Image (cartoon, rainbow, N blue to C red):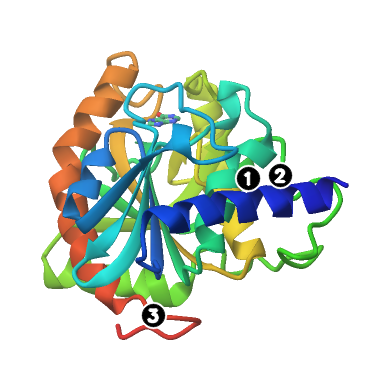
Amino acid sequence: MQQNTIYKKIREAVEVIQQHSKIQPEIGLILGSGLGSIAELATEAVTIPYSQIPHFHNPSVEGHAGKMVIGKINQIPVVLLQGRFHLYEGHSMEDVVFPTRTICGLGIHSLVLTNAAGGINTRFRPGDVMLIEDHLNLMGDNPLRGPNLSQLGPRFPDLSEAYHRGCLAAFKKTAEELKINFHTGTYAGLLGPTYETPAEVRMLRTLGADAVGMSTVPESIAANHLGVQVAGVSCITNLAAGLSPHKLSHQEVMDTSAQTAEKMKNLILNTLPKLTQKGKTNA
Ligand code: HPA
């Protein structure tokens, strides 16, 4: 049965990871395009290539390394994923969220999703940080489609706090303390791999989106299903199509996110101690 198979696969991956490191992570981080250097924050780090973890694929996208790092950031035990799988790469939704489910299976209570995104809100500039308040799932699929995996969570999970308010408050507080300029807003997740047309960007703005990207939404849904609280941080790498005089390129996305990584690192380093279990934060 599909249900048992996925559960079994997660347990197999968890078991192998636990053979590599004795650290029991409390917080997971998934690092988006060009943001892999955030893993440099980890001390006592053990790196596990995805090729050594059962049922993990290798990311095909430049800027996504394909490594898991387990260690500590600011004394907090963490697991980081350098590289994620996207639906546009041709993976199934099940494969896209497999790493998320696996790190949730390691026992984390919070998951921080980072990504590179195009700015739709006209106040946004490349290099800005947007703390995700909510998302629009415009991928045309859902990782929970199919028989419900009852060992993982309920058939009809509530998503009224897909981005946990306590975690969001913790990120806001840190950004204010560090005087990091930030926005909050709604992330629209699209299938890709094409960037949007200007007409699609106008549509997305009308729908209430502030930023657009090709990830994060499936991972947030899968983690919420498992009862793990989620925070999302977008690095606005470019103005969305039609808003800037030049054409979009993956190089621009990678360059801007690399330039913003220091700011993101500082934000994450100082927020992790404020993220605590289940509804409560020290913020
Ligand atoms: N659109 C979609 N995904 C993206 C963008 C964009 O403009 N920038 C970075 N990821």
Residue 277 position (above or below residue 16): below
Compare residues 98 and 117 and report the one nearer the observer. 98
Residue 93 position (above or below residue 255): below
The answer to whether mark 3 is within 8 Å of ligand 1 is no
Residue 191 in view of the camera: no
Quadrant location, ligand no. 1: top left
Residue 249 position (above or below residue 33): above
**Secondary structure state at the residue bearing disc 3:** loop
Which residue does the image show at 31% across and 86% down from the upper left?
Answer: 282
Task: Calculate the distance from the C-alpha at mark 3 to the C-alpha at mark 1.
Answer: 27 Å
Mark 3 vs mark 1: in front: 3
Mark 3 and mark 1 lie on one chain; the one further toward the N terminus is: 1
- Amino acid type, residue under disc 1 in the picture: Asn
- Amino acid type, residue under disc 2 in the picture: Asn
Which residue does the image show at 33% across and 62% down from the upper left?
Answer: 78
Q: Position of residue 143 (x, y in %)?
A: 69, 46
Q: Which residue is mark 2?
A: 142
Task: Calculate the distance from the C-alpha at mark 1 to the C-alpha at mark 2.
Answer: 8 Å
Which residue does the image show at 42% across and 77% down from the upper left?
Answer: 166
Q: Assess disc 1: are there few (<14), some (14-19) or many (≥20) residues with their C-alpha within 10 Å of its C-alpha.
A: some
Q: Which residue is mark 3?
A: 276
Instruction: Give residue 239's quadrant in the image.
Output: top left
Q: Which residue is mark 1?
A: 137
Mark 1 vs mark 2: in front: 2
